[in-house]
Image (cartoon, rainbow, N blue to C red):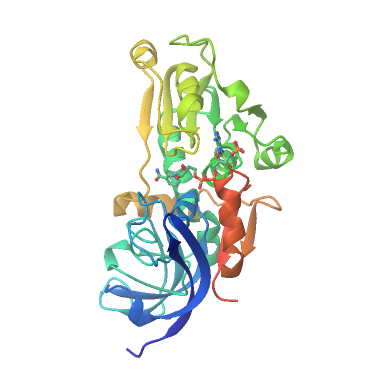
Amino acid sequence: MEQINFNAFIVREIGKNSFSGAVCETSTQELPDGDVLIRVHYSSLNYKDALSATGNRGVTKNYPHTPGIDASGVVVESKSDKVKPGDEVLVTGYDLGMNTSGGFGQYIRVPAGWVVKLPPTMSLKESMILGTAGFTAGMSVFQIIRDISTEDGEILVTGATGGVGSIAVSLLSALGYAVVGVSGKSDAHYFLKSLGAKEIISREDAVDKSGRPVLKGRWAGVVDTVGGDILATAIKSTLSWAVVTCCGLVASADLPVNVFPFILRGVKLIGIDSQNCPMDHRLAIWKLFADGWKSSYPDGFYKEISLKELDGNISLILEGKQKGRVLVDLIS
Ligand SMILES: NC(=O)c1ccc[n+]([C@@H]2O[C@H](COP(=O)([O-])OP(=O)(O)OC[C@H]3O[C@@H](n4cnc5c(N)ncnc54)[C@H](OP(=O)(O)O)[C@@H]3O)[C@@H](O)[C@H]2O)c1
């Protein structure tokens, strides 16, 4: 196929440990080999994109690089019988946007094994309003609702106004659970209440300072997105047989707990890995979003930006100041 020129947000190393991103023209010849060429319509901004865009070598080893760990769009070219030109598809995780040119470009080329056909009841835009953060919230909620009923007690969601947290709050509330959010934003109450949270506690109040190995039990389930002392305190404050999911590290990668909550209360701690989620489970989670979990989000739940507006929004997510989701439009 002829080469196609297109725009992408490309991050370059401009000095030692100094990185800068800008919208530039590139071409499909610059994309890696792969089975499926996709014209990207939407991507979204996730915390990992911000790390990739600022030179975090744990995420992206080589620059220049186009971040964007998720994308939805239309197949242009396919060497696989799994999808054909014209199909609407989405990709989240695997190596997209890490060391493979990602969704902040108008075209991506990826292995067929990464591609999910868009569920018929979901639009390309809806799929990226959810994006990787929504998919991760879906994986976390799936683990909670498998074992915990709405009668078992309250569910705590940490990093509640963030991408993963806000979708978890909304989803669990819509499913009938009593959700308590932890947030560091003093102005987050209206936003979180509009998503369905029944109570909001501050980050300070979510951290135990007594040092006791087990605290008074309150949570039947926890969706944690931040790690560190907040996750440790949540684990110590669970009811018996609670389920706790852990996906993120914006507060800390450490987890200062001992074994007592696990051996005295039977607490289950479940790690969430959306990047390498097996395809059958991946399809099941997207189907749940497309059918049973369809929910409407309040005004201001997501904002739509262009490639040119990525830079400022990357700074905001790194400072923990984003609320809800950031949708990136690559068609207008
Ligand atoms: N394992 C996986 O598969 C997977 C997938 C997606 C994301 N993640 C990880 O999950 C985490 C959240 O991702 P996201 O996309 O939701 O990010 P995000 O939109 O930036 O949300 C993170 C939220 O955490 C809170 N927060 C920020 N800094 C904090 C701090 N120092 N201490 C405590 N809370 C803090 C903030 O909410 P409040 O102001 O409301 O407290 C912030 O909005 C990230 O670590 C990301 O890498 C993992």
**Which residue is more in the foreground, 108 or 54?**
54
Q: Is residue 27 above or below residue 41?
A: below
Q: Is residue 252 above or below residue 14?
A: above
| Camera sees residue 67 | no
Q: Which quarter of the image is occupied by the N terminus?
A: bottom left
Query: Horizontally, is 190 left or right of 248 in the view?
Result: right
Label total for image = 0
Q: Is residue 191 above or below residue 118?
A: above
At a point 49% along the width and 23% down the height, the residue shown is 234
Tell me where residue 95 appears, x and y as whole percent.
33, 58
Tell me where residue 122 appears, x and y as whole percent.
51, 62
**Which residue is more in the foreground, 77 or 171?**
77
At a point 57% along the width and 49% down the height, the residue shown is 317
At a point 42% along the width and 27% down the height, the residue shown is 243
Tell me where residue 113 appears, x and y as whole percent.
27, 63
**Which residue is more in the foreground, 62 or 255?**
62
Residue at the far front: name it: 16
| Camera sees residue 194 | yes
Q: Which quarter of the image is occupied by the C terminus?
A: bottom right
Tell me where residue 254 appears, x and y as whole percent.
40, 29
**Which residue is more in the foreground, 187 or 191?**
187
Q: Is residue 55 above or below residue 168?
A: below
At a point 54% along the width and 14% down the height, the residue shown is 209
